[in-house]
Image (cartoon, rainbow, N blue to C red):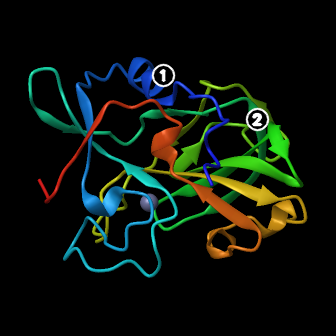
Amino acid sequence: MSEARDLPQSGFCERLQLTNHLDVAEWMFEPGMLFQSSATWWGDRGNRLRPHEGLDLCLFRTSTDRVASLLPGSLIPALYNGEVVRIIDDFLGRTIFVRHRQYGSAGRDLYTVYGHVEPRAALSAGVFVNGGEGIAHLATRGEGETGPPPHLHLTASWITREVDALQLGWKLMGRQKEVSLIDPLSLIGCRYALLHRQI
Ligand SMILES: [Zn+2]
């Protein structure tokens, strides 16, 4: 079942790079950054509590062959036109759930979810955003904390319409009855390389 096949490419990576003046030759993904990975990519590279519900964007290679990171404060665009339906705290910042009703069918809607960010001022549930519009800034890691460096966690998913906005959260994303996850790499139009080991 190719659930993402009918969705348009979002132009997300191009917009992210243009908005933040990033010189990206290609994004780089360690195994633990990828969709459905059971590993982490920080600390001792231990296992995740459950398979990764999305994609982590952090590292990229520049045109001069340097390895660089997405910096805290980077402006994060929405993938598609949509409505912000919920904002919750996460362990590095906040998470924004955006619903894209225009792609919905068969009793479910497309959602994109942006984790470890600080929402733009006045962004709240009920606000409509355009695809490519900056909706948040990448969160900073708090001082003295261990865990992953600043990065964007991106999730794309079909969610059934029985789910109320107040139920949207990380616990829900593991429930296959209501949630059908999509590999974000298929939607964001990034040039990328897969790394087989850590940098
Ligand atoms: Zn993640």
- Residue drawn at x 51%, y 51% is 183
Amino acid identity at mark 2 = Gly
Q: Position of residue 48 (x, y in %)?
A: 38, 77
Mark 1, other Cα within 10 Å: few <14 / some 14–19 / many ≥20: many
Q: Position of residue 114 (x, y in %)?
A: 57, 49
Pointer 1 with pointer 2, Cβ within 8 A = no
Separation of disc 1 and disc 2 at Cα? Answer: 16 Å
Left or right of 77 in this view: 51: left
Rendered-image quadrant of the N terminus: bottom right
Q: Mark 2 highlights which residue?
A: 82
Amino acid identity at mark 1 = Arg
Q: Secondary structure at mark 1?
A: helix
Q: Secondary structure at mark 2?
A: strand
Q: Where does ligand 1 appear, by image quarter?
A: bottom left
Q: Mark 1 highlights which residue?
A: 15
* Number of numbered discs: 2
Q: Position of residue 26 (x, y in %)?
A: 25, 31
Quarter where residue 67 is shown = top left
